[in-house]
Image (cartoon, coloured by chain):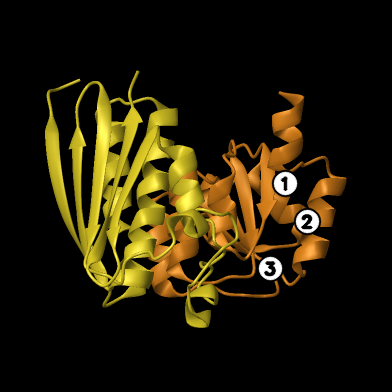
Amino acid sequence: MTVKDVQETLGARYASGEQWADREVHMACGSDMMSDVLAFVKDRAVLLTGLCNPQVIRTAEMMDVVAIVFVRSKKPDEQMIELANEREIPLLCTGHRMFSACGLLYEKGLRGGADYERLN
Amino acid sequence: MSDSIKLNYQITDEDFTRAGEASGDVKKRLRQMGCSPEVIRKVAIAMYEGEINMVIHADGGEIDVEITPEEITMVLKDKGPGIPDIEKAMQAGYSTAPDNVRALGFGAGMGLPNMKKYSDEMHIDTVVGVGTTVTMKVYQQ
C-alpha cells in the first residue's frame, strides 16, 4: 500500500506533502498517546492520531513514520506543516473517527505492528 | 566513521513545541555519519523520551552526547524534583505527569520504560529535591 492508497481509502485530503504520495506504507498505528507510539518499533508505518500538535511530527520523525493521518477532522497548523515538510512526512486529514479510519485501512489489508512482529 | 564527537544541548521548558529538537539533531548527525538505522532509531527514541521528561518534570536541563565508533552515550542532567521511587517510575503505565501534559500526548507512563527498552545500558542517579542524571548508552556494534 502507498500513502496515496491510504488517502483514497480514507477519503482524506493532503494538508501537505502530496509529492511523497508514492511512498510505501507497510503497517499502521493508531494512537493519541505519543509515548505508546514510541513504545513499539514499526517499519514504514502510517500514524493515525487525533492529537494535533508539533510533538506528533517529532514523534513521527523519531519513528521514521511514512505519513500522518489526522482523524476527526483535525487540522495541522503552519508550524506543524513546516516541521513535517522539513522531514518529508506527508500530512493527511480525514473526517473519519479513529475506529473507522483504522477499520477501513485494516479492511484493505493494512495491519498493526504486533501482527507484523509475530509474522516475522 | 570519524573519531569521537561531543555534543551539548541546553533544554529549556519555555516552549513545549521545541522539545525534541536536540534528539532530532542527533538523529540527523548519526544518519550523516552512516550509523545503522537500528542504532539511530534507538538513540532517537531513548533521547527524545528523556528530553520530553526533562521538559515535563524538571523545567529543562542539559544533555551531553558523545558519539564514538563503539557506542553513543547520552547524559541527561536536570535540577528537577528528583524521582522518589525509581522502581515505581520504571513501571509501564505509572505516571506523575499533570493533565496538561497528557493533553499533549505524553504522560502515559512509558517514558522511562521506553528509555530502558531502547538503550543498551541505562543508569539513573537521582536525589529528591536536587535533580536527576540519566546516563544511557547504545552500542554501535
- The x and y percentages for residue B50 are 36, 55
Chain drawn orange in the picture? A
In this view, A16 is above or below B112: below
Q: Which mark is nearer the camera, 3 or 1? A: 3
Q: Colour of chain B?
A: yellow
Q: Chain of mark 1?
A: A
Tell if the residue under mark 2 belongs to the same chain as the one under mark 3: yes
- The x and y percentages for residue B113 are 50, 49
- Looking at the rendered structure, the secondary structure element under dot 3 is loop
- Looking at the rendered structure, the secondary structure element under dot 2 is helix
**Residue that protrudes farthest toward the right in the picture:** A107
Q: Is residue B29 visible?
A: no
Q: In what quadrant of the picture does the N terminus of chain B appear?
A: top left
Q: Residues within 10 Å of mark 3 (few under 14, many from 20)?
A: many
Of marks 3 and 1, which one's residue comes earlier in the chain?
A: 1
Label number found at residue A102: 2
- The structure residue drawn at horizontal position 30% and vertical position 68%, both measured from the top left corner, is B128
Question: B125 or B95, which is in the foreground?
Answer: B125
Separation of marks 1 and 2 at Cα, in angstroms:
13 Å
Left or right: where B122 falls relative to B38: left
Q: Amino acid at mark 1?
A: Asp
Residue at the spot of label 3: A71
Q: Are marks 1 and 2 in contact (CB under 8 Å)?
A: no
Q: Are marks 2 and 3 in contact (CB under 8 Å)?
A: no
Residue at the spot of label 1: A5
Q: Amino acid at mark 2?
A: Cys
